[in-house]
Structure formats: structure tokens, C-alpha cells
Image: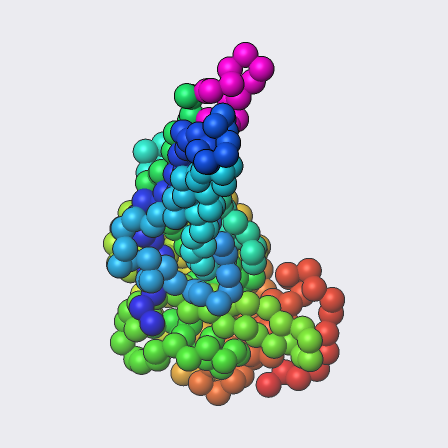
Amino acid sequence: MRFVDEVEITLASGHGGSGLLSFRRAKYVPRGGPDGGDGGRGGALVLEATRERNTLVDLRWHRTYRAEDGKPGGDNNMTGHDGRDLVIHVPVGTEVWGQESGELLADLATEGARFVLPGGRGGHGNLWFKSSTNRTPTQFQEGEEGVEIAVRLELKLLADVGLLGVPNAGKSTLISRISRATPKVSDYPFTTLVPNLGVVSVDDGRSFVVADIPGLVEGAAEGRGLGHRFLKHVERCHLLVHLVPCDATYGAPEVTWRLLRDELAAYDPELARRPEIVVLSKVDLLPPEERAAVAARLEATTGQPVLQISAATNEGLRPLIMKCWSMLGRPDGDDDDDS
């Protein structure tokens, strides 16, 4: 399924049904009086968040979504049927923005969260206007109009941990090793064209969600490369893992780490203050002595411990999982397995 994280659509709730102007006519009731019923309420337009969807692609094919109008009132004081609600399911993490106002109207960040446009109220029939001084009322009400609004839906993935790195840093291989996610993996840059989500199992009953964000390059926050389109998905991550390859494709590891930090700060300074883990990846490519020296330089630059992993050989993956679990504030688990 194609990943789509932004769509612009028009939402409209149903109009209320019109009240009826009617007088009872029966052979043996010469003065039957007014009997016009009220119109039915228009259907509501509802956006509802569900974990059963992870893309907005289905909403790209229709530009306008409208709930059913209420039915007009009938004679004999019959109220018209209410219009059917239209419920549109969107992924958890969808934000609703008004196109004209530019305001955030709703953040559907939890399962079952809803954004509702209520339907128009049905109009009163002439029976409603009957009184002791107005026995033959000719007044009635049209139904109330529904609400129509142009919105932009923007999906921001919900994940506990975000994997960040330059292209070909090994993020896709890593997420495929620590979860059941099956991203495209290859040895050329920009293999990952869309974010990938995976559930990482710590042990029975304990897990967290990790997101693989497409590779960042210098200038990503200003629109260069592919990563700039997906930096917004990092905003909801509680913890960031900076995956720094030990090769020099994008410069020395300490230079690559600074590039990642600079792009985060340029996009949103708050992201640069988010808790992070620095990981030296692809360490199987270096002999032990050189690898230790590279890790030491990176630790001196970052001012924090650096984990060393090889997704190709599974080295260091368990300690990384447990470090993530610990920094997410979850209870300590068994971390004896260093494989």
C-alpha cells in the first residue's frame, strides 16, 4: 500500500430536513388543524482514529465527503428521518488543520479519538407554532445547514523511538533485525522512501514501537534530499537513536553526528534537546583496534557513551534494545544477553 501522509479534502455534515406546512384533512374532522412534522437532523461527519490504518492514501481519490441530509417532516406530525452519519477512519496520529484558518482543529493521537462536524438541526413544522391565539399557523422552518470546511489532514507517526541517520546508515537493516518490519534493504542511498514502523519485543508482554525515518542529508530541514518530508514524524518520538555509520561516506562519524544534530535543530530546536542514544553502526567493517579508536573519538565529541552494533551480525542489538527500554522509563529487564 502506498504511504501518503498529507491530503487536502472538504468535509461537510448533512443539512437538517425542512419542517412541513400541513393541515389535517379528514372527512369527519372539518377543523383538523395543523399537523406538519419536524424535519430530521442532518448526519454528522466524523473522522475517527484507528490503528487499522497507517496511511491516508484512501482519501486521495475523493475530494469532498458529505454526510446524508435529514429528511423533511411529514403530515400527521411525522418527524423526518435523521440523516446517516458518515464516519471516515484515519490513522492514529492524524492532525486536522483548517485550510483557511491554518489552525489545528484536532489531534487524533489516540485510538478512537474523533473530530465531529455536527449535522444541521431539523426545522419545525407548523404544528410547533400552534397556540391558543394562532390555531392555523402557516409558519414553518427550513432545516439548519450543515457545516462545511476545507481541511488538510497530516499524519505524524506515533512511535516511542525514532531511528535517524544519513542514507545507507543501516536503519532499515536494523529495524528488520529487531522487529518484524520488512523494509526494503539495499546497499545504495535512499533505499527507504517512506517511514517504517516496527514493534520491538523486549520479552513476553513488553514491547515498544520504533520508526525508521528516511535518511537525512545536509540541508534536509530546508528541503534537500528525502528526509525533510518526514522530519515531522520525529516530533512524536520520545527517544531518538542517532545511527552513525563507521565508514566515511558522509565524513568521519563525529562529523556525521553533528550533521544529524544540526538538521534536527534547524527543523525544530526542541528536537535537538530530545533524549538520544548515539550508536556506531556497521562496526563489523572495521578491525577491533580501529573500531575502538573511532568509537572513542565519537564519545569525545558527543560527551556520552556510544553503543556499537552490527545489524548484519546482530552484534550489540540486545544492549541497544535494553538501553531504549530503560531510557523510555520502562522497568528494567533482563539484559544479560549481549548478542
In magenta stretch: residue 130: yes
Picture coordinates of residue 71 (x, y %)?
41, 43
Q: Residue at x 64, y 61 (%)?
A: 328
**Residue 232 lies in the magenta-colored region:** no
- Indicate left or right for 316 with 223 as reference: right
Q: Is residue 125 visible?
A: no
User: In the displayed image of the protein, which residue is found farthest to the front?
Assistant: 28
x and y, in percent, of residue 221 in the image? 33, 49
Figure check: 226 above or below 68: below
Give how far across and how far down residue 90 sits, in percent.
Answer: 44, 57
Pick the quarter of the image with the C terminus: bottom right
Q: Residue at x 69, y 80 (%)?
A: 204
The residue lying toward the viewer, choosing from 111 and 118, is 118
Quadrant where the N terminus sits is bottom left
- Nearest the eye: 154 or 176: 154
Please state if 332 lies on the left or on the right of 281 as rendered: right
Start and end of the magenta stretch? 120-137
Q: Main secondary structure of the magenta part?
A: loop
